[in-house]
């Protein structure tokens, strides 16, 4: 018996089958392109996304052979939305999270509801990225799409619908739409009324890990599934990743390092304080029952090391290709153990929390003729870690405790980076045996729905194991605390001059 976790991301999807011990028994990955019709527009072709999911399901099924799946659930990117017609057809490309078309509707919500009340209703600071603003764009500029759409679906509920099940969306993904009333756990009548969106055109919101239905017999036959396969509500990708990391109690946080660096602590209660709202810190449903989640993130994240690889590490790339080893291991092999005297502001793209500043840019301070290549490399990792330490301080001011972090994603493979994080944060950082946290989280939600598991926490704690703990070094942490005070002054000193062209 196997359990499927489907992870639908912005540039690719992954289907992973896990056994009862939480071990991977089959995996398939497919990429799909982003489209940029004009400046500020970013789209996905939902038909291409669905085909990638279907192809991955077929490949995993072939690998399973005598171990067919019994359940599935979906971990999904947030905010992106698909207009779907009466026959299930896609009426337009999906507008994804950081498409800028929704920005023009922010003043509308400021006038009609106000930022404070909007945050109190949705648990999310008002911005243009919310799903509701993408729908409003179709309503204003593509009226034929808006009027013809039977549903407006995020990718979790879109895939569920394509599997032959009535569209259903998890509370955690609904919380990313800016249409979901987080306290009442339902679509906001006030917001939908102002937007002119009938709630019947949205998926049914349910807690994560609930039975939605069974895969349609026609799809099951196509896959060669002879037994019934339960479809369950999954979640937004960050809560699913936190669940798959065993982050299911307060004061514990997931630290996911991929293209984006994201820290997501579990919360025992809904925190909607002014500090949260002022710093663009959201609070919405976790994929684990009765818990909530917040996120802090930097969009440059692990992409900064990839930038270095692609522009300055040709030698390491050649060696890695020739000797079949990890290029990042080679890049980080000789970095110094002590903190550097270089400060890197990791704003090489939109900043992330708390600023959401699209005009900021990367900055490197402290270079000298004697600066070594290895020091420069380490400074890149320190810069991302300083930025996340700043966000951790904001969480603390908002009353959100973080005492330990669990590392997942590509960055979790690097002992050097995990030690830097521990030293900068002054907190233990745990490396896990889990390699596909979001997919595992989704698969566990499907298993919970299928088997009616009562002690869900017990199952998660049994399957998710800590492989190694990186404790902060007291001396290095003290040095980083001093350097962090310098770091905090860089962005405020430059934001009103360099980025905005002021002299």
Image (cartoon, grey):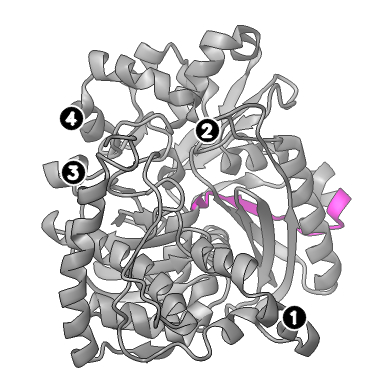
Q: Nearer the viewer, mark 2 or mark 3?
A: 2
Disc 3 marks which residue? 272
Q: Earlier in the sequence, mark 4 or mark 1?
A: 4
Q: Earlier in the sequence, mark 3 or mark 4?
A: 4
Q: Nearer the viewer, mark 4 or mark 1?
A: 1
Residue 318: which numbered mark, if any? 1
Label 3 secondary element: loop
Q: Quadrant of the C terminus?
A: top left
Residue 116: which numbered mark, if any? 4
Q: How far apart in space, not on screen, are marks 4 and 1 (Cα)?
A: 53 Å
Left or right for 321, reference 498: right
Q: How far apart in space, not on screen, are marks 3 and 4 (Cα)?
A: 10 Å
Disc 2 marks which residue? 99
Q: Which residue lies at the image location 57% right of the left edge and 76% below the top edge?
A: 435
Residue 399 covered by magenta stretch: no
Q: How far apart in space, not on screen, are marks 2 and 4 (Cα)?
A: 24 Å
* Label 1 environment density (alpha carbons within 10 Å; few <14, some 14–19, many ≥20): few
Label 4 secondary element: helix
Q: Earlier in the sequence, mark 2 or mark 4?
A: 2
User: Which of 255 and 387 lies nearest the eye of the viewer?
Assistant: 387
Q: Which residue lies at the image location 31% right of the left edge and 49% below the top edge?
A: 353
Q: Nearer the viewer, mark 1 or mark 3?
A: 1
Label 2 secondary element: loop
Q: How far apart in space, not on screen, are marks 1 and 2 (Cα)?
A: 36 Å
Compared to residue 237, the image places residue 212 above or below, namely above
Q: Nearer the viewer, mark 3 or mark 4?
A: 4
Q: Which residues are magenta?
A: 222-236
Q: Nearer the viewer, mark 2 or mark 4?
A: 2
User: Which of 468 and 167 lies nearest the eye of the viewer?
Assistant: 468
């Amino acid at each position: 018996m196997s359990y499927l976790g489907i992870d639908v991301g912005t540039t690719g999807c992954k289907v992973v089958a896990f056994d009862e011990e939480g071990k991977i028994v089959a995996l398939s990955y497919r990429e799909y392109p982003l489209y940029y019709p004009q400046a500020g527009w970013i789209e996905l072709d939902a038909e291409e996304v669905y085909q990638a999911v279907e192809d991955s399901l077929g490949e995993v099924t072939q690998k399973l052979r005598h171990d067919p799946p019994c359940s599935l659930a979906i971990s999904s990117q947030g905010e992106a939305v698909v207009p779907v017609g009466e026959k299930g057809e896609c009426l337009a490309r999906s507008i994804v999270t950081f498409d800028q078309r929704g920005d023009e509707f922010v003043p509308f919500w400021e006038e009609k509801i106000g930022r404070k009340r909007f945050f109190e209703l949705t648990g999310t600071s008002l911005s243009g990225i919310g799903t509701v603003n993408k729908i409003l764009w179709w309503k204003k500029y593509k009226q034929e799409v808006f009027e013809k759409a039977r549903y407006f679906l995020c990718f979790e509920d879109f895939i569920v619908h394509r599997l032959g099940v009535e569209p259903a969306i998890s509370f955690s993904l609904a919380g990313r739409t800016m249409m979901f009333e987080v306290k009442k756990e339902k679509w906001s009548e006030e917001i939908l009324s102002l937007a002119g969106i009938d709630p019947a055109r949205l998926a049914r919101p349910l807690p994560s890990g609930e039975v939605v239905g069974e895969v349609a017999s026609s799809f099951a036959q196509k896959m060669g599934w002879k037994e019934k396969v339960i479809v369950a509500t999954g979640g937004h990708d960050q809560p699913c990743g936190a669940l798959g990391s065993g982050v299911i109690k307060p004061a514990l946080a997931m630290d996911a390092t991929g293209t984006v660096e994201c820290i997501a602590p579990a919360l025992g209660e809904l925190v909607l304080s002014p500090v949260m709202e002022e710093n663009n810190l959201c609070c919405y449903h976790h994929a684990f029952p009765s818990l909530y989640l917040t996120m802090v993130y930097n969009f440059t994240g692990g992409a900064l090391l990839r930038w270095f690889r692609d522009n300055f590490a040709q030698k390491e790339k050649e060696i890695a290709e020739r000797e079949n080893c990890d290029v990042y291991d080679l890049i980080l092999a000789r970095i110094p153990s002590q903190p550097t005297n270089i400060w890197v502001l990791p704003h090489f793209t939109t900043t992330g929390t708390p600023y959401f500043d699209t005009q900021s840019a990367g900055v490197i301070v402290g270079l000298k003729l004697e600066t070594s290549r290895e020091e420069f490399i380490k400074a890149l990792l320190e810069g991302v870690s300083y930025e996340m330490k700043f966000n951790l301080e904001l969480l603390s001011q908002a009353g959100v405790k973080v005492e330990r972090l669990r590392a997942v994603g590509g960055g979790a493979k690097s002992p050097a980076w995990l030690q830097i994080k521990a030293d900068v944060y002054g907190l233990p950082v745990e490396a896990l045996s889990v390699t596909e946290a979001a997919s595992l989280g989704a698969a566990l939600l499907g298993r919970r729905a299928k088997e009616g598991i009562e002690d869900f926490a017990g199952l998660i704690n049994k399957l998710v194991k800590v492989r190694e703990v990186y404790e902060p070094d007291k001396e290095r942490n003290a040095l980083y605390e001093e350097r962090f005070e310098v770091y905090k002054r860089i962005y405020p000193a430059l934001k009103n001059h360099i980025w905005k062209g002021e002299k």
